[in-house]
Amino acid sequence: MKNSINRQIDTLFEELENRDSEYTNHLVKDGIVNENIFNSENTKVLFICKEPNNPKQKEGDFRDWWKTELKHIFSHRIGSWAYGILENFPSYSVMNKRIKFDSLSRIAFINIKKLGGTSQSTEMEILEHAKRNQDILQKQIKLINPDIIVLGISWWSSVRNTLFQGFEHQILADYVHKYDNHLVINFYHPSTRGKSNLDLYNELNRLINFNNRL
């Protein structure tokens, strides 16, 4: 697929590494996990998060990792949330490891900071990378062209505003926005503590289906 979306995204990554020495040989890539499956979905879903949670991570690619393994609560939750969105939120009781793993291949995923980080990233640090990478990130979003974006960045409005600067903006409901043609859900980070998997799944269902509350 000469003009595949992921190949165009890889070209953006080459540009990022060439212009920003901090990213050279340290870039953790992301994008559409399985482009054939993603293109077949009626609803295109993109998850946006802060940074890879591994300060020792040098290089890598979520598109490769998520084709071979399901590790850590971060990936488990994204898999279950993806399944809920794509299958109209069936009862959480049906959820299992196979469903979550398979659901990762149905989505796209990007981090704002594409360098290994820690579990305690700060708003100012992520905002700095949102500004540095703004053009790359916006091009990624436009190439992926999702119907729904789940924004798991701890409700940091400064980061969200930078990420979507220049997009036409509407507030549809609490935590529910529209930027251009993308429905954007401001939500918990997938590794958030103090919330059960079931509670998070049900809360995302409530936000995705906000029209039912109007």
Image (cartoon, rainbow, N blue to C red):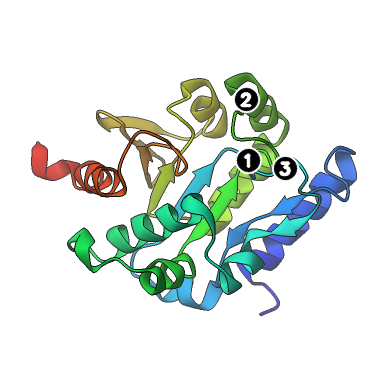
Mark 2 secondary-structure assignment: helix
Task: Pinpoint residue 50: horizontal percent, then vertical percent.
Answer: 58, 38
| Residue type highlighted by circle 3 | Gly
Who comes first in sequence, dot 2 or dot 1? 1
Under circle 3, the secondary element is loop
When the figure is inspected, residue 205 is found, relative to residue 194, above or below; the finding is: below
| Quarter containing the C terminus | top left
Left or right position of 113 against 169:
right
Point out the frontmost of discs 2 and 3: 3
Locate residue 213, reporting x and y percent.
10, 38
Q: Which of the two discs, 2 and 3, labels the residue nearer the N terminus?
A: 3
CA neighbours of label 3 inside 10 A, class few (<14), some (14 to 19), many (20+)? some
Marks 1 and 3 in Cβ contact (< 8 Å): yes
Residue contact between numbered discs 2 and 3, judged by CB atoms under 8 Å: no
Residue 175, position as x, y percentages in the image: 31, 31
First-in-chain label (1 vs 3): 1
Q: Which residue is mark 1?
A: 51
Residue drawn at the location 44% of the way across and 57% of the way down? 76
Element assignment for label 1: loop
Q: Is residue 67 above or below residue 195?
A: below
Image spot of residue 86 (x, y percent) = 31, 64
Position of residue 144 relative to residue 207, above or below, is below
For residue 80, the mark is: none
Q: Is residue 130 left or right of residue 37?
A: right
**Residue 161 visible here:** yes
- The CA distance from mark 2 to mark 3 is 16 Å
Disc marking residue 127? 2
Mark 2 neighbour density, 10 Å: few (under 14) some (14–19) many (20 or more): many
Q: Say which amino acid is labelled 2.
A: Leu
Distance of label 1 from label 3 (alpha carbons): 7 Å
Instruction: Report the number of discs.
Output: 3
Q: Nearer the viewer, residue 147 or 83?
A: 83
